[in-house]
Image (cartoon, rainbow, N blue to C red):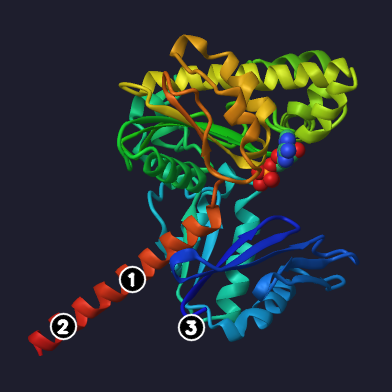
Amino acid sequence: MSTSVLVINCGSSSIKYALVSEHRKDRIFGLAENLGSADARIKGITTGGAELELSIPHADHEKALETILERLAHHNPQAIGHRVVHGGTLTKAELLTPEIIERIRTATPLAPLHNPAHLVGIEATMRLFPHLPQVAVFDTAFHQTMPSHAYRYALPKFLYTEHNVRRYGFHGTSHAYVSERGSELAGSFKKGGWLTAHLGNGSSTCAIWNGQSVDTSMGLTPLEGVVMGTRSGDVDPSIHSFLASNLGWDIYKIDKMLNSQSGLLGLSDLSNDMRTLIEASEQGNEDAALAIEVFCYRLAKSLAGLSCGLPRIDGLFFTGGIGENSAYIREKTVAYLPHFGFNLSQEQNNSLKRGTEGRIDAGTGPQIWVVPTDEEGRIAKETEHVVLEQVNTSAKKSDIETVMA
Ligand code: ADP
């Protein structure tokens, strides 16, 4: 590897990392998990595809990052790109400065589970690598092109003007990458109207017109929208007062239920994992079958709703663990959208090899593609871009200073 970007995604007890080479060809990647516990470890793939498993008992984020960075130092990373879920009012990737870190902190009430963990990672890498340029890439930034009629809630105006209560949208790096790559595969790079379905443990949909997000399913927080692994997606907001009045639940209990005990897990009373549910449903488990049906129906309904943001629909892209790997879920979802003219080729859908790109429609109606997401690659690209911009601005500044001197 010559020049490379280290991409870091810090969760509350885990750190995903990837060293992405120039032109994003080679990858070294891994996951530090169970941080803070006796069972803390790093699992990953090193140079040449060799597997790595390293026990780091009781390591915290900083210790884990130190270990990861020690192992990667000889690859000489040129910059670090941090995934940050909520950028608040920040509209694009930013070089990390004390001011930007403060703005990420200010956005914490909007992503209380994610932003504090990102800040721990950012502060640790700033201490460990004070001389490397570091960039924050926000999940929310891609959706900043949404028009106000898509991002405003029908709530009192002051909640927006004084408290930033609005729809932000998430999974932006994935929707951006997949729509760009997909439209390129379709021969109309960043042109036309596309729908994306990012289906993983967290799931969201997006409508993209000429390369820009015009609407998306997630809102103020990543709870709004389609059914997810453990998140409910859309429910009647009066559920809060109903549960408080009738069951005496407080706001924390309701929030936990909606975020961690609902979705596929809540519906099936079995698992949040789609593979487990498909297997159980094949063996006759009716709750698992219903969870899958609700998932696909709500997903189709979300895509149909988002289509209002597009002057025309050129096609649909599936991505994420479920979208990339499950022909069954893709088929069931498209079956709910016949009135848009979507026409899935069962043969192409079933024969697409796991984790590969491919077109799966029958050649009539809007196109349907599977496009494996590459959030790390996209974060590395945006990081490079910000660093280069910075270098150019500094170069111009020193030119001006020389002329002025
Ligand atoms: P995350 O959002 O945590 O990154 P992923 O994108 O890896 O998650 O997606 C995880 C989901 O993908 C799980 O529900 C898992 O069951 C599902 N999945 C992975 N492979 C398959 C498959 N072959 N069929 C159905 N679902 C799958």
Give the Cα distance between marks 1 and 2: 16 Å
Whether residue 390 sits left or right of residue 284 in the image: it is left
Where in the image, quadrant-wise, is ligand 1 located? top right
- Give the answer, above or below, for where 11 lies relative to 67: above
* Residue under label 1: 388
**Is residue 10 or residue 332 the one in the foreground?**
332
**Amino acid carrying mark 1 in the image:** Leu
Circles 1, 2 touching at the beta carbon (< 8 Å): no
In the image, is residue 228 above or below residue 246?
Answer: below
Q: Residue at x 60, y 53 (%)?
A: 115
Q: Residue at x 45, y 22 (%)?
A: 306
Query: For the residues carrying marks 1 and 2, which lies nearer the camera in this image?
Result: 1
**Is residue 395 in view from this perspective?**
yes
Q: Secondary structure at mark 2?
A: helix
In the rendering, at what x and y percent does residue 337 appear? 53, 14
Q: Which residue is mark 2?
A: 399
* Marks 1 and 2, the one that precedes in the sequence: 1
Q: Which residue is mark 3?
A: 131
Q: Residue 359: percent from the left, percent from the top?
A: 50, 34
- Quarter assignment of residue 123: bottom right
